[in-house]
Image: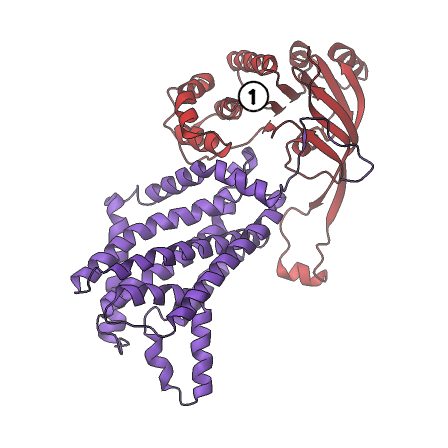
Chain colours: A purple, B red
C-alpha cells in the first residue's frame, strides 16, 4: 500500500493474495476438517476397486517386509550385527516410507487437484497437508503390523516405546515441511515428480533402512573418515528418525549418539516446517496457473 | 437502503503475462538463455475505482476480452493487482464457468469437500446438506461421479456450494447462463436473499435482459476501463445504443 492511497473505510480489510503468515495459518486451522476429510477419502478410495479392498492396507506392508527380509536377510545376508532382522526391518522401512510418501504425495498434490483449485478459493496449503495426513493414516496400519511383528519376535512392550510418539510428531512436521516445498517446486517444474523417486531410492540406501550403519562404519580404517561418515548419517534426518525408533523399540539394538539424533530430528523438523510454510505461502497466487 | 460499504476498489490495475501455450522445455530455455521468451503482457484492468454498498446487485457488461473476468478475479484475491488496492468486508466467493470441482468423485463428496474447503464446520455442513442438494436439484444424481453430470447440473451444484456459506460478497462470472429456466428462477431468488441479508452481488453477463431484471446498477467496462457506472437501465440503454448488446 503506497502512502498516496487513502486507508480502507472502516470495517473493510485489504484483499491480498498472500495474507500474513499468522492469518494464513489461522485460515488453515479453520479448514482442518477439509484436510482430514480429503485425506480419509483418498486413503479409503485407494483400494476400493480391489477385490480384497481395505485388506490391502494390511497386506501391503506385510508383503514388503517379507520380500526385504527374504532378499536382504536370507539371500544376501546383510543382517550383520542384527539379532532380530525382521523386527529391525519392521521398525525402519515404514518410518522411511512415511517421509517418502508424504513428500512425493505433496509434490503431486497440486497437479492432482487442479480443477478444485480453479473452482474454489481456499488456502492451497491444505492440499499438501492432506497428502501428509493421508500417509499418516497409511503409517498407522503399517505400525500395527510392525508392532505385532516385534511382539511376535520376542521384543517386549516397554515404557521406552512411548518415545516413538515424539519421534513421529517431529517426523510429521518434517514431512509437512518437505511436502510444502515439493508442492511449490513441482508446480513450477513438473519434472520434479519424476526426479523424487530416484532421490528417495538413494536416500533409502543412505539411511541404513536395510543395514545397521553402526556395524558397517567401523570397517573404515581411517578414524577421521569414520567420524565423517557417522556425522553424515546423523545429519540425515531419515536415518535419525528411524534409528531413534529402533533404539527405543528393539531390545537388541542400542544406537550410539542418541542425543545427537534427537538434535538432528528437532532441528530438521522445526526448520523445514517453517521454511516450508513460508516458501509455499509465497507462491499462493501462482498455483494451478502454469 | 443503508450506506455500509462492502467493497472498494482504488485505481486497480492488473497486468499479467501470457506465455506460449506449452511450458518451455530445457532446450527452449537454453536457446533463450533461460528467459521465457514468448510472452505478451496484457494490461487487462486499467485503473478501475468503485465503491459497492450492502444490498446492491451490480451487473458488469462489456465485450469479450474487456477485462471483466480479470476484474472479478482480482476482487476475489486470485490475482494480485499490479497497482491500486481492493478492500472488502470478507473473502468474496467467485463463481466461474467451466469450474469442475472434483470430476471423479460423487456429488455428495463434492458438497462435503467444497463446503469444508470454504471454511464451513462439519456441524453446519450436516445441517445444510439437504438444502444444498435440494437447491441444486440433484437428489437422483447425488451419488454419481461429477463427470457424469451435464454442464448445467455441474453449474447448479457449484452455485449451491458457493452460496451455501452465505458470502457477503458474491461474484458471478457468467455462471448463470448454463442453467435451465427453473434453475435461473431459483438462483435469482437466492441472489435476492443474499441482497436482503445485506450482501453485495456482482454479476458478469451478456444477457442484458437478466441484468436489467436483477440489477440496480451496472458497470460497463471496455479495454479494462470503466466506461459507465450508474443506474442499470441508463447504462444498459447506452450499451445497447453502442451496438454491442446482444439483447435477445
Q: Is residue A195 above or below residue B41?
A: below
Among the 4 quarters of the image, the one containing residue B49: top right
Residue B203 at x, y percent in the picture: 65, 21
Q: Is residue A208 above or below residue B37?
A: below
Q: Secondary structure at mark 1?
A: loop
Name, please, the residue furthest toward the right: A4
State the residue position of label 1: B178
Q: Residues within 10 Å of mark 1 (few under 14, many from 20)?
A: some
Q: Return the residue nearer the eye: B40 or A277.
A: A277
Residue A250 at x, y percent in the picture: 25, 67
Q: Chain of mark 1?
A: B
**Numbered-mark total:** 1
Residue A193 relative to residue B86: left or right? left
Identify the residue at horizontal 59%, vertical 45% (top origin). A21
Q: Return the residue nearer the eye: A246 or A204.
A: A246
The answer to whether residue B173 is seen in the rendering is: no
Identify the residue at horizontal 61%, vertical 18% (top origin). B199
Quadrant holding the N terminus of chain A: top right
Residue B214 at x, y percent in the picture: 64, 12
Q: Is residue A289 above or below residue B2?
A: below
Q: Return the residue nearer the eye: A224 or B109.
A: A224
Name, please, the residue furthest toward the bottom: A221
Residue B78 at x, y percent in the picture: 63, 37
Residue B98 relative to residue B68: left or right? left
Q: Is residue A180 above or below residue B148?
A: below
Amino acid at each position: 500500500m503506497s502512502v498516496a492511497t487513502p486507508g480502507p473505510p472502516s470495517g473493510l480489510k485489504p484483499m491480498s493474495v498472500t495474507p500474513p503468515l499468522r492469518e494464513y495459518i489461522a485460515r488453515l486451522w479453520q479448514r482442518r476438517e477439509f484436510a482430514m476429510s480429503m485425506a480419509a477419502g483418498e486413503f479409503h478410495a485407494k483400494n476400493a476397486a480391489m477385490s480384497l479392498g481395505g485388506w490391502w492396507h494390511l497386506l501391503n506392508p506385510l508383503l514388503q517386509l517379507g520380500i526385504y527380509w527374504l532378499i536382504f536377510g536370507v539371500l544376501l545376508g546383510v543382517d550383520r550385527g542384527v539379532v532380530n532382522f525382521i523386527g529391525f526391518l519392521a521398525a525402519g522401512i515404514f518410518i522411511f516410507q512415511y517421509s517418502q510418501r508424504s513428500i512425493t504425495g505433496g509434490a503431486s498434490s497440486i497437479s492432482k487437484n487442479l480443477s478444485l483449485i480453479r473452482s474454489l478459493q481456499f488456502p492451497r496449503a491444505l492440499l499438501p497437508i492432506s497428502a501428509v495426513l493421508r500417509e499418516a493414516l497409511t503409517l498407522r496400519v503399517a505400525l500395527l503390523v510392525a508392532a505385532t511383528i516385534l511382539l511376535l519376535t520376542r521384543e517386549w512392550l516397554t515404557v521406552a516405546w512411548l518415545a516413538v510418539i515424539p519421534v513421529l510428531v517431529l517426523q510429521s512436521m518434517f514431512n509437512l515441511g518437505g511436502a510444502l516445498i515439493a508442492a511449490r517446486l513441482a508446480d513450477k517444474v513438473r519434472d520434479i515428480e519424476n526426479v523424487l523417486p530416484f532421490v528417495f531410492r538413494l536416500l533409502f540406501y543412505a539411511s541404513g533402512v536395510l543395514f545397521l550403519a553402526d556395524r558397517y562404519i567401523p570397517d573404515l580404517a581411517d578414524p577421521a573418515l569414520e567420524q565423517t561418515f557417522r556425522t553424515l548419517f546423523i545429519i540425515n534426518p531419515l536415518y535419525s528418525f528411524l534409528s531413534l525408533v529402533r533404539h527405543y523399540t528393539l531390545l537388541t539394538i542400542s544406537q550410539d549418539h542418541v542425543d545427537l539424533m534427537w538434535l538432528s530430528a528437532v532441528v530438521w523438523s522445526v526448520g523445514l516446517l517453517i521454511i516450508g510454510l513460508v516458501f509455499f505461502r509465497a507462491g499462493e497466487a501462482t498455483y494451478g496457473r502454469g | 437502503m443503508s450506506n455500509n460499504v462492502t467493497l472498494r476498489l482504488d485505481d486497480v490495475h492488473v497486468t499479467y503475462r501470457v506465455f506460449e501455450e506449452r511450458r518451455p522445455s530445457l532446450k527452449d530455455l537454453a536457446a533463450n538463455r533461460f528467459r521465457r521468451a514468448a510472452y505478451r503482457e496484457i494490461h487487462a484492468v486499467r485503473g478501475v475505482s468503485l465503491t459497492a454498498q450492502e444490498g446492491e446487485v451490480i451487473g458488469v457488461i462489456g465485450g469479450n476480452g474487456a477485462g471483466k473476468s480479470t476484474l472479478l478475479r482480482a476482487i476475489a484475491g486470485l490475482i494480485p493487482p499490479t497497482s491500486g488496492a481492493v478492500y472488502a468486508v470478507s473473502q468474496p466467493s467467485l463463481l466461474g464457468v467451466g469450474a469442475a470441482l472434483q470430476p471423479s468423485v460423487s456429488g455428495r463428496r463434492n458438497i462435503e469437500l467444497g463446503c469444508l474447503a470454504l471454511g464451513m464446520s462439519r456441524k453446519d455442513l450436516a445441517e445444510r446438506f439437504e438444502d444444498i442438494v435440494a437447491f441444486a436439484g440433484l437428489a437422483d444424481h447425488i451419488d454419481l461421479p461429477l463427470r457424469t453430470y451435464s454442464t448445467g447440473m455441474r453449474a447448479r451444484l457449484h452455485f449451491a456450494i458457493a452460496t451455501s456459506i452465505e458470502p457477503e460478497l458474491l461474484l458471478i462470472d457468467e455462471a448463470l447462463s448454463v442453467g435451465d429456466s427453473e434453475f435461473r428462477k431459483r438462483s435469482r431468488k437466492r441472489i435476492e436473499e443474499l441482497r436482503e441479508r445485506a450482501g453485495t452481488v456482482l454479476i458478469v453477463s451478456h444477457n442484458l435482459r437478466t441484468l436489467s431484471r436483477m440489477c440496480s446498477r451496472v458497470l460497463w467496462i471496455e479495454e479494462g476501463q470503466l466506461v459507465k457506472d450508474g443506474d442499470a437501465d441508463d447504462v444498459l440503454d447506452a450499451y445497447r445504443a453502442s451496438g454491442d448488446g446482444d439483447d435477445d
